[in-house]
Amino acid sequence: MSITSYITRRLFGAEIDKQIEASKTVALQAAMGSGAQEDMQWRRLSGASNRELPIAAWSRQVEICYWLWKTNPLGNWIIETLTTFVAGKGFTYSVANPDVNQVLDDFWFDAINRMDIKLEQKVRELFLFGVQCWPIFKAEQTGRVRLGMVDPAQISTIYADPQNAEVLIGVKIQSLHTAETRHLRIILIGETETVISQDARIMRETFTDGECFLFAINRVSNDPYGTSDLFVIADWLAEYEEFVFNFADKARRQNAFIWDVKMEGADEATCRKSANDYAVKGEGEIRVHNEKTTWNAVAPNLAAVELKEAAGVFRNHILGNKSFPEHWYGGGGDVNRATAGESNEPIMALIDSRQNLVKYMLETIFTYVIQSALDARYLNVPAEEAFSFSIQKPETSNRDLTKISTAVQQITAAIVVGASQGWIDPPTATKLFAFVIALIGFEIDPETMIAQEEPGWKDYTQSGDQGPGTGKDKSRTRSGDSGPATA
């Protein structure tokens, strides 16, 4: 530092600092006034590890995605198509114990729950908003459970175990119109309740406004909020919609035409007078004129040939994000039956993955329903029998029975040859046959078939035989004999 700078700093340092702070304040206010205020809550990519969206951005996401589903044809089609394939045919369940089956039926067909109708609606909202919070209402006498629903825009905070970000323990619900808040405990199934940290237990003790189920899609482990299927393509859906609207306006202009009148030797005044004398002509009208006047119908050429290619780029960019093939949304292209079947595999894999998620959700809810009935002593069955249930997913596509039956016939013949040659033992052959027959949609339990007693000597002995190892000579034993025949 020079001597001049040193003296200036010593004499006027306080005033310099004051002016610098004042200029910073003015600059900050100007920046906020110019639109930077919108970015104040956004974190830097290299910032903290908390990946949840700011509250304002989360509520905005809910509004955007709902609006796209409500008004955008392609956005609505994406959600409805996923929902229909995942849950449109309905999930079914089977229970070994009739008492447990009655408990689940009471829950499934309850007047409020009506899961046979509302499951598809709940799946639609999960895909649309990315997260679903269902508070539960339980009858203390019977343990009967009813599900509620919380508007995703009301989800203010989702709490995770401080020691384990994968375990979500509570939800803060903020009313949209009042300052009222609720804290709900997220239902933890199985041993999860016993393995959460001490900090999480202390936090859960303060959540005294009830319990809820929380499910989310499109999230990572330490992201407590889910993400809508439409959020990542929201801008492109809007652009595609504007593109189509612009084309509609362009098409209207292309269908328009004007009368071009050419008058030989006429000056500007004569042309203007003729334009005023002859009104705009309608379709099919006749105009009689001399050889000096020429009329032509002229339509604009706006190069509409590239429209299909441009629309395809937009549409495929959007559909490709969800693995939808082009021909699913009316774009046939060069697709034939063979290539269409191959291009369906990615979207079918996504649908199957979503069905597994819905199956897990139902298993979680069923487990809680059964446990509630056991705790209330409304259900009295052994624990290992009480939770013996299974949930069946609907078929994602129609089976080609022609191909499957041919394959079943050939594989079954191979199993028979292998068993007759001793290459595979009978239990393995039974399991292979059960696997093959399941391809046509019929399931058998190979373990049950293997466990059945195989035919033995008892099936071939006469009444009164004692069997081998008893000292009796069966070849000489007759009905009524008390022992071996004597010489």
Image (spheres, rainbow, N blue to C red):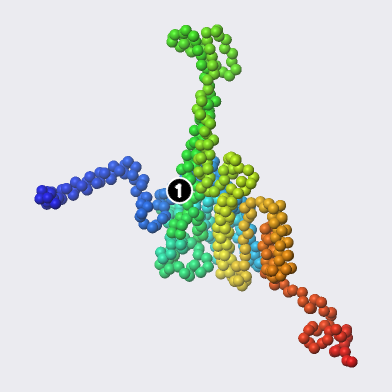
Image x and y of residue 114, in percent:
60, 55
Please state the total of marks drawn on the protein image: 1
**At 16% from the left edge and 48% from the top edge, which residue is drawn?**
16
Depth order, front residue of 267/400: 400
Residue at point 88%, 84% (across, down): 478
Residue nearest the observer in this picture, 431 or 40: 431
Q: Which residue in the protein does label 1 denote?
A: 61
Q: 66 left or right of 97?
A: left
Q: Where residue 120 sits in the image (x, y, percent)?
A: 59, 52
Q: Tell me what residue is drawn at x 10 percent, y 48 percent.
A: 4
Image quarter for residue 442?
A: bottom right
**What is the quadrant of the C terminus in the image?**
bottom right
Q: How many neighbours does mark 1 have within 10 angstroms: few (below 14), some (14-19), or many (20 or more)?
A: many
Q: Quadrant of residue 413?
A: bottom right
Image position of 304 with respect to 81: above or below: above
Q: Nearer the viewer, residue 391 or 413?
A: 413
Residue 266 to residue 463: above or below:
above
Residue at the spot x=28%, y=44% of the render? 29
x then y, percent, for residue 245 = 50, 34
